[in-house]
Image (spheres, grey):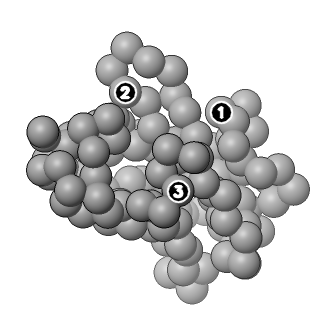
Amino acid sequence: QVQLVESGGGLVQTGGSLRLSCAASGGSFGSSRLGWFRQASGKGREFVASISPNGGSTLYANSVKGRFTISRDNAKNMVYLQMVSLKPEDTAVYYCAAGNAFVPLTTTSQAIYWGQGTQVTVSS
């Protein structure tokens, strides 16, 4: 079983940057696809980005493409989400997720493990 713990959320102004981190323990981190999802207040959880086990393949939601970058460090069991040019509509709780290496991890049903979430608030 994989345990995921997010950190790095906070309050930032429009146009600012944040880097989210997710520390993983247990299970087979290096063979799992990892991803980030977010859930704004009153809305469903939506896909943000995912990355393949070796880091060679990434996927992004259209709403964050060009502004967010997902990366991973398998030696440290960490996955990151670098966010720049933040907008108020990026405000949400951000969740780290892990899934099978053979799925794109672009829907919540493809995630096997979830972190507890970290709040990101972008003020206008």
Q: Residue at x 53, y 56 (%)?
A: 65
The answer, for residue 71, to whether it is visible in the render is yes
The amino acid beneath tag 3 is Lys
Q: CA distance from mark 2 to mark 1?
A: 15 Å
Please provide percent x and percent y for residue 100: 80, 53
Which residue sits at x=20%, y=56%? 15
User: Circle 2 sits in a helix, a strand or a loop, which is it?
Assistant: loop
Image-based side of 117 in relation to 59, left or right: left
Crowding near the residue tagged with mark 3, few <14, some 14–19, many ≥20 C-alpha atoms within 10 Å = few
The disc at residue 65 is: 3
Residue 27, quarter of picture = bottom right
Inspect the image, locate mark 2, and give the three-letter code of the amino acid beneath it: Ala
Circle 1 residue: 108
Is any part of residue 119 visible from this angle? no
The percent position of residue 71, horizontal first and vertical second, equals: 53, 72
Q: From the viewer's perspective, is residue 82 above or below residue 13?
A: below
Q: Earlier in the sequence, mark 2 or mark 1?
A: 2
| Between 93 and 57, the one nearer to me in the picture | 57
Binning the other alpha carbons within 10 Å of mark 2 as few (below 14), some (14 to 19) or many (20 upward) gives some
Mark with earlier residue (3, 1)? 3
Mark 2 sits on what residue? Answer: 40
**In terms of secondary structure, where does tag 1 sit?**
helix
